[in-house]
Image: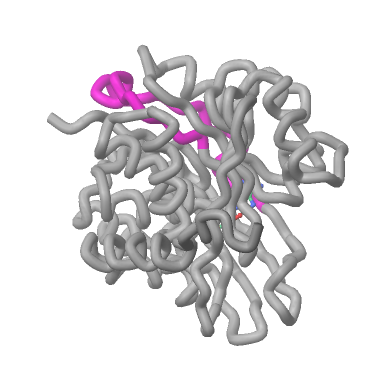
Amino acid sequence: MSVGLLVVGSIALDSVATPFGVTADAPGGSAVFFSAAGTILHPVQIVGVIGSDYPLGALKALEARGVDLSGVERAAGESFRWKAKYSYDLSSRETLDTRLGVFAQFRPKLPEKFRDARYVFLGNIDPELQLGVLDQVKQPALVACDTMNYWIHSKRDLLLELLRHIDILMVNDAEARELSGDWNIYRAAHWVLEHGPRMTVIKQGEHGALLVNHDTTFKVPAYPLQEVFDPTGAGDAFAGGFMAYLASTDDVSLANLRRAMVYGAAMGSFAVEAFGVEGLAGVTLDDVRARVRAFKQLVHFDLDEGKPA
Ligand code: AMP
């Protein structure tokens, strides 16, 4: 039996505008993007809630690809909705509306078989729910956690409490700056290390991602794409690739964490090539492996063995 990989996060209906198009109520959310990427490498178990208006087709498609939906509750009411607009160069986005809907009342209850999960990703959602899920997992090997400005502002104390119980905080550069109050990204990463986690992963969009622990810093670039349509979910797809690679190898050595960073970056690059979760639906394991090899090529260089002096 493969080791358990569990995610809790939003299961959303996204309305997103980029310079290349718009979506309205498209299936998305942190748990959905995570699973769509992760399941290419390893089976994923989702915990979350949907409202009575959520189209089941999107989730059924994930189920067909190896995602276990038995921790997804369907509640009376509206699904989580998020509306955002990207800048012309896709480097920043503005949240126009966040409606929690059924997530406001949600109290996660893990199916018994999910409690043995060894790899746990607390995807972007209310830190209270993240803590609620973590409490129910018996003995995880590695717990990583994401968050967003929305929660940094509204639930900072709970978020700081959560930091004391996780191994890796995985956030984007703006979130790391907001949380730490430090504009310097390396200092921000170390601020996180002083608050509990033993590692920080900082996603930097088109500038790649960093893995920082007390002793080392590792950097993976972003894959050089000439066409980017929709950055939504790239961070969650990164997390899905990172965590699913760790689960599939069941190895948390630093060397393997570095490889996991590259699998994460590969998944992030597939996610942004199309609108919504569609970019990930047709991606095969061979596609991922080919992209990981391309990353190796991208950063490889030989030392000149002493020349010039
Ligand atoms: P990313 O682009 O990786 O930061 O993730 C975008 C996804 O996060 C979208 O699919 C949204 O539905 C979801 N999202 C946005 N805001 C929140 C929030 N406050 N809590 C949970 N999920 C959110």
Q: Nearer the viewer, residue 215 or 86?
A: 215
Tell me what residue is drawn at x 34 percent, y 49 percent. 38
Horizontal side of 115 relative to 265 (left or right) equals left
The quarter holding residue 200 reads: top right
* Residue 58 position (above or below residue 79): below
Is residue 235 or residue 223 the one in the foreground?
A: 223
Place of residue 104 in the rendered image (x, y in percent of width and height, measured from the top left): 62, 37
Which of the 4 image quadrants contains residue 83?
A: bottom right
Query: Farthest bottom residue?
Result: 20
- Membership of 193 in magenta stretch: no
Describe the colour scheme in one phrase.
one colour
In the picture provided, is 196 more to the left or to the right than 264?
A: right
> What is the span of residues highlighted in magenta in the rendered image?
99-122
Q: Quadrant of the C terminus?
A: bottom right
Give the percent coordinates (x, y) of residue 289: 27, 61
- Considering every residue shown, the one lying at the far front of the view is 309
Residue nearest the viewer, comparing 116 with 100: 116
Instruction: Say if residue 124 shows up in the picture.
Output: no
Residue 168, how many percent across, how many down?
Answer: 55, 30
Relative to 164, is 275 above or below? below
Residue 219 in view: yes
